Image (tube, grey):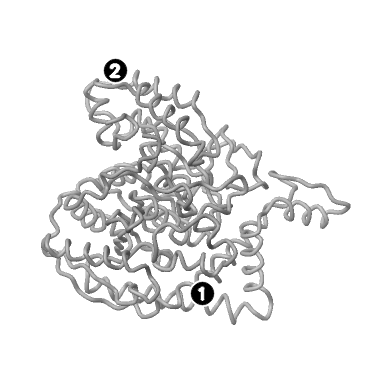
Amino acid sequence: MALYDLTIHEARALLDAGEISAVELTQAVLDRILTVDNNVRAYLTLTPELALEQARAADAARAYKDGPSSPLLGIPLAIKDVLCTAGIPTTCGSRILENFIPPYDATVVARLKAAGAVILGKTNTDEFAMGSSTENSAFFPTRNPWDLERVPGGSSGGSAAAVAAGECLGALGTDTGGSVRQPAALCGVVGLKPTYGRVSRYGLIAFASSLDQVGVLTRDVTDAAILFSVIAGYDPQDSTSMDVPVPDYTAALTGDIRGMRVGVPKEYFVPGMQPEVEAAVRAAVEKLAERGAEVIEVSLPHTDYALPVYYLLAPAEASANLARYDGVRYGLRVIGSSLEETYKQTRGQGFGPEVKRRIMLGTYALSAGYYDAYYLKAQKVRTLIKGDFDRAFEQVDVIVTPTSPTTAFRIGEKTDDPIQMYLSDIFTLSMNLAGICGISIPCGFDRQGLPIGLQVMGPALGEMAVLRVAYAYEQATDWHTRRPVLGR
């Protein structure tokens, strides 16, 4: 097996045994990026000199230290380009931040560095994480490694594609309405979205502050547990961070789910979804039953309202958060004849069409005379959606659903129809509204050889149960071992 195809835990075992060095591993991944990224376009910024410097430091630390090393020491990782990285451009996939270089690291980045990880660079994203296909990047679209004519999903499409293509061993993404789980499903990798508040958002450039959460993309569930364990935990710099202990998430990976209650919501199998997706997910549920889980039908009756609620609340928060980009303090500045004209020119040239669309939607929903009718009502329905999950989790330990209603669609196929694009997240965004956790894992392929994702959802702080079920399913199948033939 090529070094770039290793999982994090496989690479760590070889590093600890002295069979490979962090420099050799990092160089292999950098070479892989040079070979395939002109086609995939997963990265916006590469930092090869920094990566090799960090790899040399990791080798020195491993040689010096007597005893167990950090599970990420010398492991090459990628960072979604909405997370601040000191001295490295952080663009959010937008022209308005094209030349922005933060003076500090996001907390999650600082934790990776403290664990000895190697930072390869920043991955492509839909502009300000607004999108489901990574076609909204202001710079270029990322392509799906399984079929270069198709999207990798979004908005963490660059991170998902990089993991699938062997251009990193793991990556950070962010999930506001499915932006870790949906691209994980479309690229055939694992994507974990933690409970809101479980991982610090300090240094994450905000899209929708009550929905955003940093997550991880990896090749298997073990790697997701390892990477998540490093970035999770309380951060006093984030007022929404939960001050609760972080367990050893790898302890959940027992493979034993006998007696666990698995809920299947009838509202998540809808007309119009790809038949192969439904068949693969139902087969996965049967596999869980074979492993000893008790399958129970549950109901989430307000599911139909999740999409309109999300597209009122998320744009409303975006319109407030993006007001800071005014051409005065940082980022792009286009001088106009007056202050107001400077605002207009800067935002007109700096923001792309999808960001402008969502700002206008949000501003309208918050405007005088419409606030009660739209924003306030959406918040009330959000409470009902959360209540649905609360009641369901009184009956079951986890809920399993499809991650996406379809496999990867063609580049350009949905760009002229925003509603169809928004429907790509129909199975993922309820979780963000409720603030709970979930994971997407590979569960099959369609007739065109495109990956299908299974979503496992858990209650708030229920990551142990989610990882336990996901790992048990993964160990009973081989979907996670398959790699795209790209550049081989």
Please tell me which residue is depicted at 62% across the width and 68% down the height of the picture: 362
Q: Is residue 192 above or below residue 402?
A: above
Residue 360 placement: quadrant:
bottom right
- Residue 303 at x, y = what percent? 40, 76
Give the amino acid at mark 1.
Pro
Q: Secondary structure at mark 2?
A: helix
Residue pointed to by mark 2: 63
29 or 254: which is nearer to us?
A: 29
Looking at marks 2 and 1 on the same chain, the residue that comes earlier in the sequence is marked by 2
Question: x, y percentage for residue 364?
Answer: 66, 72
Does dot 1 land on a helix, a strand or a loop? helix
Q: Which picture quadrant has residue 161?
A: top left
Q: Say left or right for 419 vs 449.
A: right
Pinpoint residue 249: horizontal percent, then vertical percent: 25, 48
Q: Could one spot residue 126 in this view of the protein? A: yes
Front disc: 2 or 1: 1
Q: Residue at x 61, y 64 (%)?
A: 358
The vertical placement of 403 against 487, above or below, is below
Residue 354 location, x and y as percent? 62, 60
For the point 29% across and 42% down, which residue is it? 223
**Looking at the rendered structure, which numbered label has been put on residue 308?**
1
Quadrant of res 163 = top left
Quadrant housing the N terminus: top left
Binning the other alpha carbons within 10 Å of mark 1 as few (below 14), some (14 to 19) or many (20 upward) gives few
Q: CA distance from mark 2 to mark 1?
A: 55 Å
Q: Is residue 292 above or below residue 73?
A: below
